[in-house]
Each structure stands twice: as structure tokens, then as C-alpha cells.
Image (cartoon, rainbow, N blue to C red):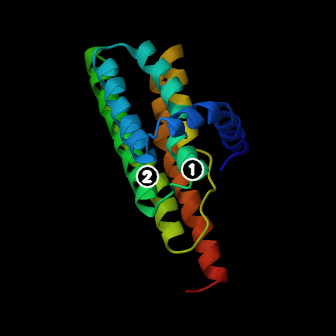
């Protein structure tokens, strides 16, 4: 991951520990947090579909860091499971799906869904999925694959900033290109590992 992403994750994790302890005392499971977090992106998609870009951006900025809570809760309470990790990864993909569907309706509502914008949304969505899939598949095969610029944190940070500040089209074009660049970076990274240690 990028140094920026690592630093922000470390800072956010420290800030969220009081909330994690509170959730543990309330006996709330990490999987419940995972499902709630994914469901919250439906609210973001609805906000986008209704044309409230600023509200959606603020919600992403708030809910993005909270995505760390389920993992923190699982690790600090000893409730980390293989299914929990699988569920978290799967729900993260659904969350991004809801987000990009919301963006389609957002641009439709604002008469801005021209062919280039639609292709950019589709490319950004598939690129985001491929970045995450490349890591998941590589790690399932025993390789490390945390490299790359546009991890989930950077993607959400850019989308939230663009919706709040009003440069959505530029952000989409950046995502449409750099998510695939990151996926290719991960492919090359795994290829070099595989070349050194044939399996």
C-alpha cells in the first residue's frame, strides 16, 4: 500500500479504538458491523440518486474510515474468522457496486451522463474490483500483494473529495485509469514473486 494509505489507516485505527471497545462491551459481532457498513452504502447511493452529491461525499468521508471497525473488533476481541474475512471482502465489493450505481443515477439526474462519463464509471468500477480481486487471489495462492497506489482507501478518499468539492468528472477519469494501472502493478508484482519461486 502507499505510505499515505498506511499512515491514514494507522491514525484512524487509533482514533477508533474507543468505539471498538464500546462495541465489544455491547457484544456486537464483527460480522454485524460488516453487514451494517455495506448497507450504509445503499444510503449513499440513494443520496446520489436524489442528486445530493455533497451529502454523499460527507457520508463517504465518515463511513470510509469506519470500514476498519469490523477488522479491528475481530482482531482485538479474538473473534477473527476465515468467514468473517471472506464476508468483509465480499461486502466491500457490494459497497463499491452500490456507490457506482448511485453515481450513474447522480449524473443522469444532473444531465451529465454522456458516453464518456458512463464508460469512465464502468471502467472505474471494474478497475476497483480488479484491484481488490488481484490481491485476494494472490494472497490465496500464498503471494504478498499489498502494493499499488489506488487501494480502497485512496479510491474512497478521491470520490468523497470530488463530491464535496465538485470535480466528479475529473475524479472518475482518474479512477478509470489508475485503478487499472494499480491492478496491472499488482499482476507484475505477483509475476516477479512467481518467477523467483516457481510453484
Q: Indicate the position of residue 199 as horizontal and vertical percent values.
A: 55, 86
Q: Would you name the residue on which mark 2 appears?
A: 89
Query: Along the line of sight, which residue is nearer the eye, 184 or 56?
Result: 56
Q: What residue is drawn where x is 49% and y is 18%?
A: 58
Q: Indicate the position of residue 10 as horizontal and vertical percent values.
A: 70, 40
Which of the two discs, 1 and 2, labels the residue nearer the N terminus? 1
Q: State whether residue 50 is above or below residue 19.
A: above
Q: Are marks 1 and 2 in contact (CB under 8 Å)?
A: no
Q: What residue is drawn where x is 62% and y is 81%?
A: 195
Q: What residue is drawn where x is 28% and y is 20%?
A: 49
Q: What residue is drawn where x is 65% and y is 38%?
A: 13
1 vs 2, front mark:
1
Secondary structure state at the residue bearing disc 2? helix
Residue 151 seen anywhere in this rendered image of the structure = no
Image position of 149 (left or right of 120): right
Secondary structure state at the residue bearing disc 1? helix
Crowd around label 2: few <14 · some 14–19 · many ≥20 (10 Å): some
Q: State whether residue 124 is above or below residue 159.
A: below
User: Which disc number belongs to residue 148?
Assistant: none
Query: Along the line of sight, which residue is nearer the eye, 99 or 28?
Result: 28
Instruction: Write down the quadrant of residue 37 in the picture.
Output: top left
Residue at the bottom extreme?
199
Cα separation, mark 1 vs mark 2, equals: 19 Å
Q: State whether residue 27 is above or below residue 181.
A: above
Q: Would you name the residue on which mark 1 appears?
A: 77
Residue 97 seen anywhere in this rendered image of the structure = yes
Crowd around label 1: few <14 · some 14–19 · many ≥20 (10 Å): few
Number of numbered tags placed on the structure image? 2
Q: Indicate the position of residue 91 as horizontal and vertical percent values.
A: 37, 46
Q: Indicate the position of residue 93 as horizontal and vertical percent values.
A: 38, 46
Amino acid at each position: 500500500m502507499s505510505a499515505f494509505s498506511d499512515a491514514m489507516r494507522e491514525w484512524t485505527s487509533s482514533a477508533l479504538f474507543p468505539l471498538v471497545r464500546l462495541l465489544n462491551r455491547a457484544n456486537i459481532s464483527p460480522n454485524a458491523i460488516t453487514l451494517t457498513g455495506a448497507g450504509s452504502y445503499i444510503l449513499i447511493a440513494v443520496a446520489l440518486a436524489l442528486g445530493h452529491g455533497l451529502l454523499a461525499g460527507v457520508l463517504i468521508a465518515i463511513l470510509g474510515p469506519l470500514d476498519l471497525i469490523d477488522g479491528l473488533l475481530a482482531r482485538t476481541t479474538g473473534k477473527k474468522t476465515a468467514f468473517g474475512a471472506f464476508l468483509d471482502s465480499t461486502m466491500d465489493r457490494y459497497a463499491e457496486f452500490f456507490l457506482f450505481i448511485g453515481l450513474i443515477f447522480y449524473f443522469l439526474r444532473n444531465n451529465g451522463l454522456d458516453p464518456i462519463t458512463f464508460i469512465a464509471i464502468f471502467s472505474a468500477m471494474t478497475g476497483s474490483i480488479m484491484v481488490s480481486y488481484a490481491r485476494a487471489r494472490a494472497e490465496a495462492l500464498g503471494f504478498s500483494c499489498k502494493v499499488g497506489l489506488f487501494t480502497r482507501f485512496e479510491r474512497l478518499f478521491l470520490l468523497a473529495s470530488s463530491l464535496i468539492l465538485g470535480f466528479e468528472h475529473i475524479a472518475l477519469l482518474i479512477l478509470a485509469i489508475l485503478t487499472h494501472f494499480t491492478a496491472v502493478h499488482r499482476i507484475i508484482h505477483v509475476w516477479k514473486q512467481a518467477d523467483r519461486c516457481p510453484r
